[in-house]
Image (cartoon, rainbow, N blue to C red):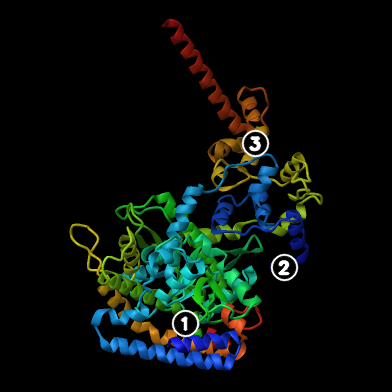
Amino acid sequence: MGQLRQALRTAMVERDAARASGLRRELRHAETLWQDKAAALGQGEGAVLTAAGPPAVDRAVTALLPTREQVHQVLSLLEVAAAPKLITAVHGAFFPGELPASRLASMRRDEERSYRSAPNARPYYVCPALTADRLAPARALLTVSTWPLERRIVGAHSPRVDFLTATTKIATAIEWFDRRGPHWLADARARADRLLRSFAVSIPGALAPPELSGHAPPLDPRQVAEAAEAELAVHVAVDRAEREQAAAWARQRLPETERLFGTRLQMIRNDASSH
Amino acid sequence: MNPTVNSTTAARLDALRGGQPPVNHTARTLVGLSANPGCSRRALLDACGADKGKVARQAGYPWPFGQSPFALSRGNAFERQVKEHGGARLLALLRESLGLPIEQVAYIPLESVGDNANRELRYRRTRQVLAHAARGGSSPGILYDHPMLRLAVGGQLVYLEPDVIAFKIGDKFHVVEIKSFPVIDRQADGTQVAAATRQAAVYVIALRELFADAGLDPDLVAASIFLVTPKNFGNTPIATLIDARKQIAMMTTQLARMDRIETLVKLLPAQVSFDLAVDAAGVARRPQAQLAGDLRQVPARYRPECLDHCELAGLCRAEARQDDSLDVYGPGVADVLGGIGTAQTALALAEGQRIPSADQTDVARALRHAERLRTELAAGAELAGGAA
């Protein structure tokens, strides 16, 4: 997989679009295989999480990362388009260092400018999510350019699907951190719990019924993740169809820059997906 | 510009405002406007989209008007909390209280069309999406965030941008109003609920007009509104279904009664303008007195309640006081002294220094009687004071 990634990067730098997309497909396939294997291996020592969990980087180094790397880290944990507020919250819970939301404000524009001046000079770009009906940049949602187009497009069901996916990712990350031993920074565990609880209150069956004493029910990350996955199963097919339809349309009609940063032309309308 | 006002009127309205960008109507301003439907000054300034707060300031009558910044930011934070993550909290509330099926989660943001936030474009998109959903199309929409609505007020179309979510359950559309005043033990402040209901009623009316416009049955919009407020002293949202039929009927009547803008514009002297243009140094081009003078050319109907509803209240009150008008004392006094315009006349009649006209005879008799009683009481008090 590492080799594939490197080859893909080279292809992107050389602007060999055909080879890059072929490699991307292979890489995705390899990743799926890897995840399936890991899942099949089962419960052994956080195997599932080696792919999804946060990378174990030295904390001193992580704290010095530039903003875009920090954002990339968070988005890689969540694996869905996220708003700056959520990115900041997740960063505060799982990663060291500061990531104020104000720093995210100008990032989208900077990334786009950097891409336009030297396309594919960087291994990834932080770019906006695209709306399924118009393929225009969605408000305040950030994604990573190396993700498949389907994941970067948001349709009518995607806010809920992404919310539920983010919930499972956060819940599993908490479990993973707990299992790995004393990895929590001061207050980080409390912050992570608060974040997960704020998500769990909106998911049926994620929290135990309130206790008679009036205290908030205890939070079990496993239960939250299972509840979120249960609801996710209801929506995922509809959502995937919406996204795939829009992605196919984008691949046909849009040049790469617009596939990454969205179209700004008002004339283009995707009648297929808005009806 | 729009079909209900002819182009000369529209051009005149635009010219009145000068070079400033137009200010949008909100449900709050419409409720304020309908609270005093006879006031031409407010109707005209609202119609031309002038920023009344700035006009009042520049005319020399700044009026501390509007919500406190703390209340505003609290309201916004609560609203964000309810709406974030595709309305996750709202969905939970709807599932709990209305039994919304699990699979209905689609969320359609209408706050911009792509990058474009043009009002007409957004209105068309809102109409397209909602009409499509109403016709039972495959559109999966349940929550429609930030729809742009349009309403005819005083013969002019105004855009309304509710901070609101419309949702469809069954085949009915409901309006959700998010407010940050607390509901404690299921009891809320009556005046605040009434104000929120009146505002939501405006949205219901506008939504019904949108459906009528699209050739659909306006009764697709439910007459009950869904009020989301914080529960007790915390931040947990709670939903209440409120029957707004009375408020909708009331607002419909009020909106229909408003003077037609064209009539007002025709009566306006040609040189009147509310232009706020400033020169390079930031000094207003038009002198304060001139702007204030132009404002006074448009008749106002001042009432003490205007202080709660209108940015121009300071100016109108000063004017009413200067004219010695009975309006300063509120409609109660003005009604009792019907036919008398100023306090001076009333006093002169009471003291018998003025001969009442035919229609003032009754009021004059009552005033003189009151004056006699007052004199007797004053004399009695003096005697009592002397005896002690």
Q: Nearer the viewer, residue B244 or A59?
A: A59
The three-letter amino acid code for the residue at tag 1 is Arg
Q: Is residue B320 left or right of residue A89?
A: right
The three-letter amino acid code for the residue at tag 3 is Ala
Q: Position of residue B12 (x, y in %)?
A: 77, 58
Q: For the point 64% across and 83% down, which residue is it?
A: A268
Q: For the point 68% across and 39% down, which residue is it?
A: B60
Whether residue B243 is visible, yes or no, is: no
Q: Position of residue B342 (x, y in %)?
A: 65, 33
Whether residue A254 is visible, yes or no, is: yes
Write down the residue under mark 1: A151
Whether discs 2 and 1 lie on one chain: the answer is: no
* Viewer-nearest of discs 1 and 3: 1
Q: Is residue A164 left or right of residue B281?
A: left
Measure how far apart labels 1 and 3 are at the Cα level.
Answer: 62 Å
Q: For the point 50% across and 83% down, which residue is it?
A: B135
Write down the residue under mark 3: B318
- Chain to which the residue tagged by mark 2 belongs: B
Write down the residue under mark 2: B1
- Chain to which the residue tagged by mark 1 belongs: A
The quadrant of the rendering that contains the N terminus of chain A is: bottom left
Q: Residues within 10 Å of mark 2 (few under 14, many from 20)?
A: few
Measure how far apart labels 2 and 1 are at the Cα level.
Answer: 42 Å
| Residue B320 occupies quadrant | top right
Q: Nearer the viewer, residue A246 or B68?
A: A246
Q: Is residue B198 above or below residue A117?
A: above
Q: Nearer the viewer, residue B14 or A210?
A: A210
The three-letter amino acid code for the residue at tag 2 is Met
